[in-house]
Image: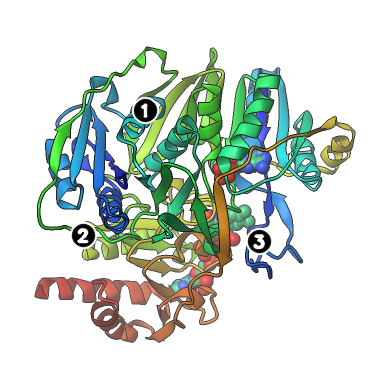
């Protein structure tokens, strides 16, 4: 079984986001970039699936600039077999990204495509189901865990108020959320091996978009919080404030 | 032609999630554009009452598409029916609830209609005859102001952010006939395992009581449970990743970058230090209360009200005071 995992390069979640002078992007200086955390869960899920089946291939693909090679190498170091860089422009329009990824999926024809439930930079949470729809494939989103059974993936999906068990026939698209499996650390041996694994680069044309980012803004200034007091004696005053000032009780 | 369609969400005929907010927002935005709001409910049967309710929240017309095959949510099937209704209705914009279901459905519809989508808007305004949308990025560390020059403009709305306002007058309810061919569906929901009983999900709750490693032991969750009960049925439980990873609480309750994003009116962070990944999931809450014995804990930087102290003393007292308040009426 061939699995393709889509991975995106994003700023580390610890990053302090500063808006650049053009007011339309973030200032990249001092920013450390990582594989988007949910994409790491997706790589882990792909590797576990391959291990459980005892056959198949795991490939990682990323749309981005030259820098995204580093992201792909992280996937290879975890254990993926090969990587493909689709060299092209990344925008906030997930549909443009999905179209570009769809063209690649049609070329390779993997049985299963895994994505993160969302990329933690733009938080658009859309590329997976868009990609599936463009391909005419079924899609299950927000899957914490899945297992292969005779060409069907049995997925556990977290929804409001419970867990849904969804069966989906392959070929399919699954978006992965945090589940019970921690993504493995790349061992030194893995990192060395990754250097010798195939990593192809393909120039792509990302379709034009009608979604325009006019400006990035810092979060609205929040009034300085207030320490109401210490210990249980502060509670009556807290309750008074919640009721009379914040009007939430 | 400035009609806006609000996509409703229901389960067993009961309106769910952010639907009322979405209908209200559609009504006020449409009136600025000189049009009105329609709402659409998809489902099996028995949605009459839900439909009337959406009329009261500002939908001039509530369309109800009932079909046996639509009785449970199925992304592929719902998206097709919806795309068809949007095409024939000629809407200027379509608003979705930013719930798990809404955020699964909206991208599929966007792909079918070949238009972009802005997820989890926190502000929508009319500017130069078009819509300008503000949405959080980098987990709320910044906001993007975007414009979509396409028809229709597709947006999902972050729950608990837009006001739900009941209005005078009722909308007309209209049944629409839909054709659904479920034979080609390749994804099937085979089981639903309810969790948390009647407690609202952390992502939907109007009040969230969240606990972290400061509680020291899963056995101690009883004190948060009591606080939640004292507040009432609109309150849910949340947790930090540290306690989810430790297996004390289910992942469904995790708030933060790799958990759920919540924006309740009131959020209690109890024994939670306030790591940046936790703040990512709750910083847009209306009012934040922190209880922590470390006065330098970062959670106090985002909290509106903080109490420095031992949570095992503070929380039971808080529960007691709130109970007293409620019994006064
Ligand atoms: C990629 C990535 C993603 C992550 N995603 C998330 C996420 O989604 N959600 C999340 O929450 N975290 C996330 N984290 C983890 C995050 O960095 C923190 O480790 C975690 O939030 C800490 O949980 P905590 O506040 O419960 O524990 P701690 O940091 O240990 O804090 C416990 C707090 O309790 C207080 N305390 C102790 N005893 C008492 C007492 N008796 N009374 C009052 N106060 C007391 C202490 O002063 C302390 O402030 C993520 C990390 C990474 C790297
Ligand atoms: N530029 C990209 N390259 C590869 N995969 C991507 C890219 N952008 C998004 N994805 C995938 O789509 C998922 C959801 O992204 P988003 O819809 O942008 O939140 C991510 O977790 C990735 O798996």
Q: In the image, is A16 to the left or to the right of B73?
A: right
Earlier in the chain: of badge 1 and badge 2, it is 1
- Which residue is identified by label 1? B74
- The residue indicated by pointer 2 is B165
Cα–Cα span, label 3 and label 2: 36 Å
Residues under labels 3 and 1: Cα distance? 37 Å
Total labels drawn: 3
Label 1 CB sits under 8 Å from any ligand 2 atom? no
Which residue lies under the disc numbered 3?
Answer: A25
| Label 3 secondary element | loop
Residue name at image x 28 percent, y 54 percent: B34
Q: Are marks 1 and 2 in contact (CB under 8 Å)?
A: no
A170 on left or right of A62: left
Secondary structure of the residue carrying numbered label 1:
loop
In the image, what residue occupies the spot 33% across and 58% down? B160
Name the side, left or right, on which A220 lies relative to B41: right
What secondary structure is marked by label 2? loop
* Residue A116 point in image, percent of width and height: 58, 40
Q: Quadrant of the N terminus of chain B?
A: top left
Q: Chain of mark 1?
A: B
Q: Residues within 10 Å of mark 2 (few under 14, many from 20)?
A: some
| In this view, B242 is above or below B179 | below
- Which quarter of the rendered image does ligand 2 occupy? top right
Pointer 3 and pointer 2: residues touching (CB < 8 Å)?
no
Same chain, labels 3 and 1:
no
Q: How packed is label 1: few (under 14 Cα within 10 Å), some, or many (20 or more)?
A: some
Residue A80 image offset from top left, x and y in percent:
75, 31
């Amino acid at each position: 079984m061939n699995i393709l995992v889509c991975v995106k390069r994003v700023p580390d979640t610890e990053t302090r986001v500063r808006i650049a002078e053009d007011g339309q992007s973030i200032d990249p200086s001092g920013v450390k970039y990582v594989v988007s955390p949910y994409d790491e869960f997706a790589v882990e899920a792909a590797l576990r699936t391959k291990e459980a089946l005892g056959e198949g291939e795991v490939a990682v693909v990323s749309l981005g600039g030259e820098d995204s090679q580093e992201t792909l190498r992280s996937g290879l170091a975890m254990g993926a077999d090969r990587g493909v860089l689709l060299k092209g422009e990344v925008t906030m329009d997930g549909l443009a990204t999905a179209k570009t990824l769809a063209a690649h999926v049609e070329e390779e024809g993997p049985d299963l495509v895994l994505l993160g439930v969302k990329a933690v930079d733009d938080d658009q949470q859309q590329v997976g189901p868009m990609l599936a729809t463009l391909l005419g494939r079924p899609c299950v989103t927000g899957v914490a865990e899945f297992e292969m059974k005779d060409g069907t993936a049995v997925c556990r999906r977290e929804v409001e108020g419970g867990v849904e068990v969804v069966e989906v026939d392959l070929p399919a698209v699954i978006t992965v959320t945090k589940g019970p499996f921690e993504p493995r650390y790349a061992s030194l041996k893995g990192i060395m091996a990754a250097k010798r694994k195939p990593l192809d680069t393909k120039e792509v044309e990302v379709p034009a978009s009608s979604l325009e980012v006019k400006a990035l803004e810092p979060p609205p200034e929040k009034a300085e919080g207030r320490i109401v007091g210490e210990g249980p004696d502060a509670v009556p005053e807290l309750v008074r404030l919640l009721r009379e000032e914040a009007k939430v009780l | 032609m400035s009609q806006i369609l609000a996509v409703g969400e229901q389960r067993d005929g009961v309106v769910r999630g952010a639907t009322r907010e979405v209908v209200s927002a559609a009504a006020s935005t449409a009136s600025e554009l000189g049009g009105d709001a329609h709402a659409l409910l998809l489902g099996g049967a028995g949605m009459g009452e839900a439909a009337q309710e959406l009329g009261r929240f500002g939908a001039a017309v509530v369309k109800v598409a009932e079909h046996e095959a639509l009785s449970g949510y199925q992304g592929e099937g719902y998206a097709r029916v919806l795309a068809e209704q949007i095409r024939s209705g000629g809407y200027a914009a379509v608003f979705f609830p930013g719930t798990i279901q809404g955020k699964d459905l909206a991208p599929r519809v966007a792909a079918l209609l070949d238009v972009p989508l802005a997820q989890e808007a926190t502000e929508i305004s009319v500017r130069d005859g078009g819509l300008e949308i503000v949405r959080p990025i980098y987990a709320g560390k910044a906001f993007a102001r975007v414009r979509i020059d396409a028809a229709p403009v597709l947006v999902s709305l972050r729950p608990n952010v837009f006001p739900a306002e009941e209005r005078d007058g009722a909308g007309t309810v209209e049944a629409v006939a839909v054709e659904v061919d479920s034979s080609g569906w390749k994804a099937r929901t085979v089981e639903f395992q309810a969790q948390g009983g009647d407690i609202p999900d952390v992502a939907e709750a109007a009040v969230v009581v969240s606990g972290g490693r400061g509680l020291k032991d899963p056995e101690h969750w009883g004190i948060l449970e009591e606080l939640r009960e004292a507040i009432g049925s609109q309150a849910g439980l949340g947790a930090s990743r540290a306690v989810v990873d430790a297996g004390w609480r289910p992942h469904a309750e995790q708030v933060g970058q790799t958990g759920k994003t919540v924006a309740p009116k009131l959020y209690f962070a109890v024994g939670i230090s306030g790591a940046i990944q936790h703040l990512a999931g709750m910083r847009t809450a209306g009012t934040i209360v922190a209880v922590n014995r470390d006065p330098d804990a970062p959670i106090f930087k985002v909290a509106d009200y903080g109490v420095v102290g031992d949570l095992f003393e503070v929380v039971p007292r808080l529960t007691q005071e709130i109970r007293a308040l409620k019994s006064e009426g």
